[in-house]
Image: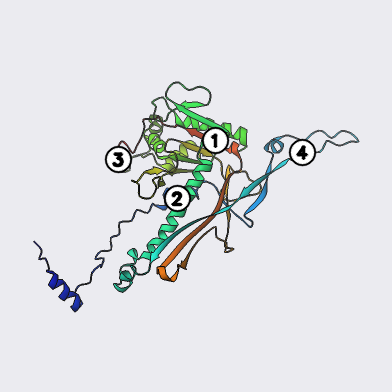
Amino acid sequence: MANVLTPEQVTANIKKGAFKPHIYLTNLCLSFFQESKNFVSSKMFPMVPVALSSARYYEFDKGDLARDNVARKPEFGEVAPAIFGKRDKYYHCEVDQVITGIDKISSLDYQRSNALAIIDPRRAKIRFIAEQMRIHMDRKWADKYFNAASWSHVYTGVSAPPSGNQFYHFDNENSDPVRFFNSLGTKMLLSGLRRPNKICMGVNVFAALQTNASVLERIKYQGSEANPANVTENVLAQLFKVSEIVVAESVYNAAPYGAPDDIKFICEPNDLLLCYATDAPSIDEPSAGYTFTWDMLGNGQYTAVSQFEGKESTHTEFIEGLICTDPEITCADLGVYLQGAVSPDFNVSAAV
């Protein structure tokens, strides 16, 4: 059993400088910051920097673009001018803010003891602000894009034989996702003039596709004993003929401060969004959505983190985060939303 110092011995050691209270003796820090790859808001649709917080933009009429207006020229005459229509659409970026504080008196222990940088209060609070803004952006993204009300084409998963805008749940033994996504791609081409190139799916959907019999049958000869075939995002992207698949794994605490934690996925884990989006903003290329960003401080950045002093009597330093974005659906025909892509009782987190 280790020797226990008496109060007198502790006092003597402090006077000698041999013992320092409140010193962290390890480089281990138990922080629960999420991995950057879990967030989806910056991956699916391009960011569009704008000079004004509110303005209009054009949307050309796809019907006019796809119509064959070329006709035989009549003798001594001319054909009627072709109509090239456009509509005005509107964006509006508003500033969101988050603030946290550093008690300068309590932080003196860290400064005087040469505490490790990983547990420095200022560094931790700045990272906390950045995490808050990522969570907020994903929640705004999900509210705008990851719901059935936003898109022209909505399909619902069922366990019984599907009809109309229905499909078999991906965890159903009759499901053939590859054939289904190929069919959806052709339908999007006819309605929006582009084939889909991106998919964002909930965690339960990804788990169901990884064990889907039809998917496994298609890749079973691609592995070896040393490198067995695994159903990854890249494998599914190739099977579904899209360039990128994003699994929405970001979470947030839905409970108010002081209540027991209620950790939830930001994007509905049983749903999926199939869409076409450009890699970068383009005036002559359609996209299902754009995220308009405004540099509210005039520094070219749509996010900003700054520090400022509180009232002198509070001995507090505040850290502020600002973010200004407006996610907009710019072509509802270039998105297909699958709600209930897995059966209601399929829950990968409950199976652990």
- Residue highlighted by disc 4: 83
Amino acid type, residue under disc 1 in the picture: Ala
Q: Nearer the viewer, mark 1 or mark 3?
A: 1
| Left or right: where 52 falls relative to 131 | right
| Residue type of the residue flagged with mark 2 | Ile
Dot 3 or dot 2: first in sequence order is 2
**In-front residue for pair 5/279:** 5
Give the residue pinned by disc 3: 225
Q: Position of residue 21 (x, y in %)?
A: 23, 69
Indicate the amino acid at tag 4: Ile
Q: Secondary structure at mark 4?
A: loop
**Secondary structure under the numbered disc 2 in the rendered image:** helix
- Around disc 1, counting alpha carbons within 10 Å, would you say few (fewer than 14), some (14 to 19), or many (20 or more)? few
Q: Residue at x 60, y 36 (%)?
A: 333
Q: How far separated are the C-alphas under marks 1 and 3? A: 46 Å
Q: Quadrant of the N terminus?
A: bottom left
What's the distance in space between the residues labelled 4 and 2, CA to CA? Answer: 44 Å
- Disc number at residue 135? 2
